[in-house]
Image: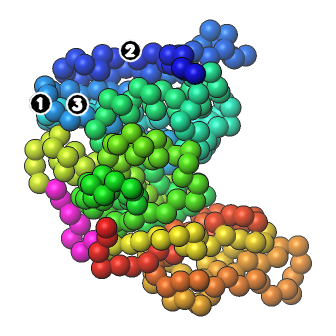
């Protein structure tokens, strides 16, 4: 069955040269606005023939490194700076960004678990459908900027995935490295089926993801890594002139081969982590303790590493519930691919 056209309309002309700032407009009807619209900011910078890069932030609304870096880029990038077309969407899930939450303030939807979307579905599903059927097909390379949000803190890395198409995998991995974060990761996703990543990759496009910090904020350091990385991405894929700028220290390569990299809590209580982000962990070492807050004098439950590697991510809030990821341990490898 053929889906109906997306209800989202763009106020920019994606084919016109120059710089345009506008919106992706999604009609909604609510108690606050009977004939309203979700207004997703979009900037298009085009200069003649060449590849198209789609740069997205705010897939989750509380991940601020990407949002901030792309807001700045949208203000600064000129047509003469690029060859081809750069589409910048700093706040992909605008309702989530405005609510300061991972999920939408309108329908509670998690955009990055809603792909490929539905033009007749919820607000979040309609946004996912528009990117699936309109934005991704017009793109050659996609950079989706993530960080840990309010509940996670993550070492800064560019990431790609294991793909059936070896050439597609190679090109994405090279882009993840060229992003120039301190780490480059071959990433294993726990629930990949409904991700933006999967939609882009299934259309044969080059997809690079990032994790760039977290805690529901950004820092001068995390923003510097993000802004440099976005520029590196555009240079690497031929949309900007210049030389890719790598970190002063050699990039560390990481691999997440399977779900055992994720350490998830089986208890509710107060979390104490025994290692800092980026520290090396040996298999069997105690990496976290969870204390029962309902009584004193009770020993904590100890969580031990199931593998050796680097602590790549950690839960940010000290309170933890059953099922929360409290740590991610990634393998340190000599090479990727």
Q: In this view, does 74 lie above or below 102?
A: above
Question: Looking at the image, can residue 309 be seen?
Answer: yes
Where is residue 83? Give x, y as percent.
14, 34
Magenta: main secondary structure equals: loop
Q: Which of 285 and 218 is in front in this view?
A: 285
In the drawing, does residue 265 fall left or right of residue 149? right
Q: In this view, does 150 lie above or below 313?
A: above
* Label 3: how many Cα within 10 Å (few below 14, some 14–19, many 20+): many
Question: Looking at the image, can residue 99 be seen?
Answer: no
Task: Based on the picture, tell me whether residue 248 belongs to the magenta stretch.
Answer: yes
Residue furthest top in the image:
35
Residue labelled with disc 3: 85
Residue labelled with disc 1: 80
CA distance separating discs 3 and 2: 17 Å
Residue labelled with disc 2: 11
Range of magenta residues: 244-251
Residue at 38% from the left image edge and 65% from the top image edge: 185
What is the quadrant of residue 136 in the picture? top left
Q: Mark 1 vs mark 2: which is more N-terminal?
A: 2
Q: What element carries label 1?
A: helix
């Amino acid at each position: 069955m053929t889906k109906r056209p997306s209800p989202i309309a763009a106020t920019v002309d994606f084919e016109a040269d120059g710089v345009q700032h506008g919106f992706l407009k999604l009609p909604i009807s609510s108690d606050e606005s009977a004939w309203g619209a979700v207004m997703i900011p979009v900037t298009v910078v085009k200069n003649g023939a060449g590849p198209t890069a789609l740069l997205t932030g705010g897939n989750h609304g509380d991940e601020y490194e990407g949002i901030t870096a792309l807001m700045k880029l949208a203000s600064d990038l000129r047509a003469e700076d690029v060859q081809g077309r750069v589409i910048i969407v700093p706040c992909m899930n605008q309702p989530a960004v405005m609510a300061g939450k991972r999920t939408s303030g309108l329908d509670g939807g998690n955009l990055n678990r809603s792909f490929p979307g539905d033009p007749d579905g919820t607000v979040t599903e309609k946004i996912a459908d528009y990117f699936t059927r309109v934005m991704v097909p017009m793109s050659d390379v996609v950079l989706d900027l993530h960080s840990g949000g309010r509940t996670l803190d993550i070492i800064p890395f560019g990431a790609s995935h294991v793909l059936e198409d070896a050439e597609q995998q190679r090109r994405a991995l090279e882009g993840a490295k060229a992003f120039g974060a301190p780490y480059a990761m071959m990433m294993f996703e726990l629930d990949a089926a409904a991700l933006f990543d999967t939609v882009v990759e299934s259309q044969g496009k080059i997809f690079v993801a990032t994790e760039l910090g977290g805690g529901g904020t950004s820092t001068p350091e995390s923003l510097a890594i993000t802004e440099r990385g976005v520029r590196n991405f555009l240079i690497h894929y031929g949309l900007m002139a210049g030389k890719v700028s790598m970190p002063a220290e050699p990039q560390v390569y990481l691999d997440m081969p399977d779900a055992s990299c994720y350490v998830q809590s089986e208890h509710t209580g107060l979390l104490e982590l025994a290692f800092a982000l980026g520290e090396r962990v040996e298999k069997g070492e105690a990496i976290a303790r969870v204390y029962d807050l309902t009584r004193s004098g009770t020993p904590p439950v100890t969580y031990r590493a199931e593998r050796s590697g680097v602590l790549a991510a950690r839960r940010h809030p000290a309170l933890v519930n059953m099922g929360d990821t409290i740590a991610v341990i990634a393998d340190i490898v000599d090479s990727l691919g």
